[in-house]
Amino acid sequence: MDAAVVELDSESKSNSIGSHGQRRVGLLYDERMCKHYTPDNDYHPENPDRIRAIWKKLQNAGIPERCVVLDAKEAEDRYLLSVHSKNHVKLIKKISSKQFNSRRNRIASKLSSIYFNEGSSEAAYLAAGSVVEVVEKVAKGELNSAVAIVRPPGHHAEHDEAMGFCLFNNVAVASSYLLDERPELGVKKI
């Protein structure tokens, strides 16, 4: 999943209609998430060109000018820890540091469809935090819907392990955030 799409139910939509009766749609993209790529620039199906192509198509169609463009935001550890173990969060936070230079590829080889490089930590934190950012804005009624064009994708990662191209489970983190951290927003199910 390279784009997380969020939309309000019909009851809540009336609260976020713009002054001219137009729907307010959020759009989030940040080139920093493209710093996560294969260490040797080998081909991999989950690569920076996936979200760059999405963003370029949207730009060519003039979509960002018709949306509320949002800034990417890094996830806070406490929200990641609502879904992932301390060891997993610590690994992803540190995997891009120099202390892991000699071990990064060996660690990735033990996981399912995962690679790491010097930009993986920042990209993973931005992806998870950006999904939280868009779901919160939609749940608050500031936007009718929103799209977060993020990577690494985030729906396969397990509690204690990166998996299936995903370093964090961005979808689970954002869901947990809405249900557990922001009950006053009235979201009862995802």
Image: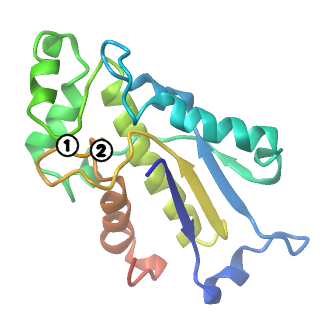
Q: In which quarter of the image is residue 147?
A: bottom right
**How many other residues sit within 10 Å of disc 1, few (<14), some (14-19) or many (≥20)?**
many
Q: In this view, does 98 lie above or below 74?
A: above
Kindly identify the residue that appears in the image at 21 percent across and 58 percent down: 83
User: Callout 2, which amino acid?
Assistant: Cys
The residues bearing labels 1 and 2 have C-alpha atoms spaced at a distance of 6 Å
Please say if 5 is above or below 45: below
Q: Is 102 left or right of 124, judged from the image as shown? A: left
The image quadrant where one finds the C terminus is: bottom left
Q: Do the residues labelled 1 and 2 touch (CB within 8 Å)?
A: yes
Q: Which residue is painted at 36% across and 59% down in the image?
A: 171
x, y percentage for residue 82? Answer: 21, 59
Label 2 crowd bin: few (<14), some (14–19), many (20+), radius 10 Å? many
Q: What residue type is labelled 1?
A: Ala
Q: What element carries label 1?
A: loop
SS assignment at label 2:
loop
Q: Position of residue 1 (x, y in %)?
A: 43, 52
Q: Image point 10% across, 26% down: which residue? A: 107
Residue at the outermost bottom position = 11
Tell me the residue at 8%/33% (across/down). Answer: 110
In this rendering, the answer to whether 150 lies above or below 91 is below
What residue would you read off at disc 2?
Answer: 166
**On the picture, is 54 further left or further right than 49?**
right
Q: Where is residue 93 in the image (x, y as percent from the top left)?
A: 23, 31
Which residue position holds label 1? 162
Residue 65 drawn at (x, y percent): 82, 46
**Quarter where residue 62 is shown:** top right
